[in-house]
Image (cartoon, rainbow, N blue to C red):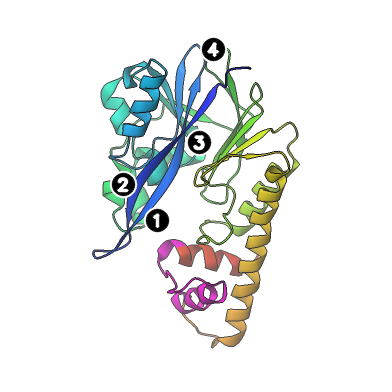
Amino acid sequence: MKRPNIFPVRLSFVLPLNAEKSVDRFVHAYIVVGEQIAIVDTGAAGYQQGLVDALAALGKSPADVAWIVNTHEHPDHIGGNGFFAERGQPRFTCHAAATRWIEDLGAQSRERPIYGFDKMAGKAIRVARQLQDGDEIDFGGVTLQVIYTPGHSPGSMSLYCPMDGALITADAIQPVGGLPLYADLQQSRASMRRLLSLRGVKTLYCAHSDQPFVGDEIPATIQAGLDYLDRVDAAVKDAVTHLPANAAQEEITRETLLRIGLTPPPVMPITIQSVMSHLRTG
């Protein structure tokens, strides 16, 4: 049996919601093994032991990591960047549109405020290579192809490994039943449709899914994400219809979240942004 080149690593972390409440979450990072070692995403700050253990199982250490690839700029995907910068000399790379928020964490915190951001995001790093759609990253015998999939964030990208037929989408596919979390509805739709059109994908890796998807699960998962966007869209329009014309964004968001079954409704800046993207025109 052919040895895989991509090794998913589940990283559990605690997500603070406010001063009184936290929830347990997880995110997947990925070790890519070619002649060089790369890590795709590094988790929330303080939760890198799983990656250290997985590297050790491969006979490697953090000092052996040559590349860190960030699929996008959010803290649960970049928080471990500083950990690896302090233990080796990896080159950091991301899509060009993600660079500013990865290099300037203060700007991200101001422009996309979430509770506990500073603790989750860790330390800023300098991006060595800015990627564009269609670029390839060669780790020596193993190549990842860049597929620009904005929507969840301005700098979100997916990565395809032709050798394994593996597609890493991070948060580009909206999880059914999860919080609506995207900066731009139309971009999210377009990105998921693009992913749905890809051929040759044998394994789909989503950052917050317990298991990878294979076979017919792959198009079904992407289509389910698209259908969920339509469900949220219908809920937004119904909420607006039943609210006063001058209803605040917070009230529109609250009523939308209730309509899709999220109780109590988590009204916060990131869900407000998602809901209000359904009301943009043009």
Q: Which type of secondary structure does the marked residue at label 4 adopt?
A: loop
| Residue named by callout 2 | 120
Image quadrant assignment for residue 3 = top right
**Which badge, 3 or 1, is on the more N-terminal residue?**
3
Disc 2 to disc 1, C-alpha distance? 13 Å
Identify the residue at image location x=46%, y=74%: 263
In the rendered image, is residue 141 in sight? Answer: yes
**179 inside magenta stretch:** no
Instruction: Give residue 282's position: percent from left, percent from top.
Output: 66, 62
**Which badge, 4 or 2, is on the more N-terminal residue?**
2
Q: Amino acid at mark 4?
A: Gly
Identify the residue at image location x=39%, y=45%: 76
Disc 4 to disc 2, C-alpha distance? 32 Å
Disc 3 to disc 4, C-alpha distance? 23 Å
The quadrant of the rendering that contains the N terminus is top right
Q: Amino acid at mark 3?
A: Ala
Identify the residue at image location x=58%, y=80%: 239
In the rendered image, is residue 101 in sight? Answer: no
Q: Amino acid at mark 1?
A: Arg
**265 inside magenta stretch:** yes
